[in-house]
Amino acid sequence: MERVKCLILGGGPAGFTAAIYASRANLSPVLYEGIQPGGQLTTTTIVENFPGFPDGVDANTLMDAMREQAKRFGASVRQGTATAVDLGKRPFKVVIDGETELEADSLIIATGAQARYLGLPSEEKYKGSGVSACATCDGFFFRKKTVAVVGGGDTACEEALYLAGLAKKVYMIVRRDVFRASRIMQEKVLAADNIEVLWNCNTQEVLGDGFGVTGARLLRKDGTVFDIAIDGFFLAIGHTPSSALFAPWLTLDAAGYIVTEGKTSCTSVPGVFAAGDVQDPRYRQAVTAAASGCMAARDAEKFLIEQNS
Ligand code: NDP
């Protein structure tokens, strides 16, 4: 059975940054990319807010560059997804794709999170051409346009307020007659001149012209069906962290995010570290994920030095 000093699960900004730091620290990391090589970022097109790219950078190009940078320092980057883990004792045991077993002296979990979508075929069709689950990533493309945000939680309010600063008009599509968001966020939304809340509404279909989004067909609870004209359709109905595999072993919060100690990447099991969106319900940015990947590699390095001394 292969034994590795530092095993990294997840091929997004957190995982690759952890691999860059761990390889430069001579930990010979092995990284498995998981189901979505390149991570969530690859569901968007141009990344305009990653520092160092004044003209923006294609998301896949950015992730390919991170992968190459990790390989350059000796990280072994592989295709595969962890399907079973035993974190009960060290070395940890990890099974990849149900067949390859590895032992790991330290483990960095950077498996990310998945934005929730409504599950409409029309929504799927326009993903990346008007449908987005990240206003901070894609809002800038909708300057002076009309957009809709689905959801009534803190994220939806935050995204609507962010978009209201860029777009001409923002609709919020809320399925009940109340927000779930905190009072302060609700008040801010209701005070914004260019946000209109459509209460008791569910989206039946995202409308488009084959190239991009042109509207949405909504069903109000009273049975009325009506269309709104929009250029962008933003989902903010929550995220699901990819942490189920680790639930029997690690402390997770009520929403399933891996709990880390203070300002570290340490989980409830010594030697297991978490980085990126799987432990971050709040910031969820490529640059914050990358930063936490760096922290996890440094924490793993320190842990391994302490174990050997
Ligand atoms: P939440 O679970 O809090 O809210 C999800 C929202 O989406 C709810 O309004 C929910 O409606 C709605 N929704 C869910 N499914 C559907 C659907 N299928 N169709 C239409 N609407 C749907 O998720 P958030 O991402 O907003 O927040 C997650 C956590 O992060 C919360 O604890 C939040 O407080 C926190 N957070 C804090 C922030 C801050 O402090 N600045 C910023 C962002 C998030 P319903 O209410 O009817 O269930």
Image (cartoon, rainbow, N blue to C red):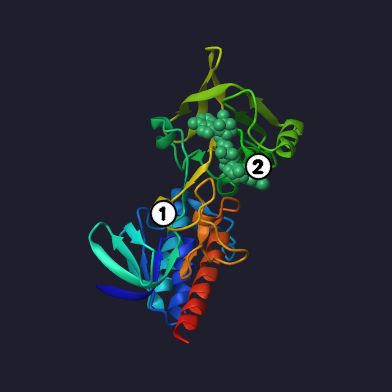
Q: In this view, does 97 lie to the left or right of 283?
A: left
- CA neighbours of label 1 inside 10 A, class few (<14), some (14 to 19), many (20+): few
Residue 231 seen: no
Describe the element under mark 2 as helix, strand or loop.
helix
Asked whether residue 209 appears in the rendered view, the answer is yes
Query: At 55% across and 61% down in the image, what residue appears?
Result: 260
The residue lying furthest to the top in this view is: 223
The percent coordinates of residue 253 (x first, y second) are: 54, 50
- Mark sitting earlier along the chain (1/2): 2
Residue 111's disc is none
Q: Which amino acid does label 1 sit on?
A: Pro
Task: Pick whichever, 31 or 133, lies toward us.
Answer: 31
Report the image quarter containing ligand 1: top right
Q: From what the image shows, is residue 260 above or below residue 153?
A: below
- Residue placed under numbered mark 1 in the picture: 248
Kindly give the residue lying farthest to the left in the view shown. 99
Say which residue label 2 marks. Answer: 158
Answer above or below: position of 305 versus 200. Answer: below
Residue 125 position, x and y percent, is 40, 35
Q: Residues within 10 Å of mark 2 (few under 14, many from 20)?
A: many
* Pick the front one: 135 or 14: 14
Q: Where is residue 53 in the image (x, y as percent from the top left)?
A: 56, 63
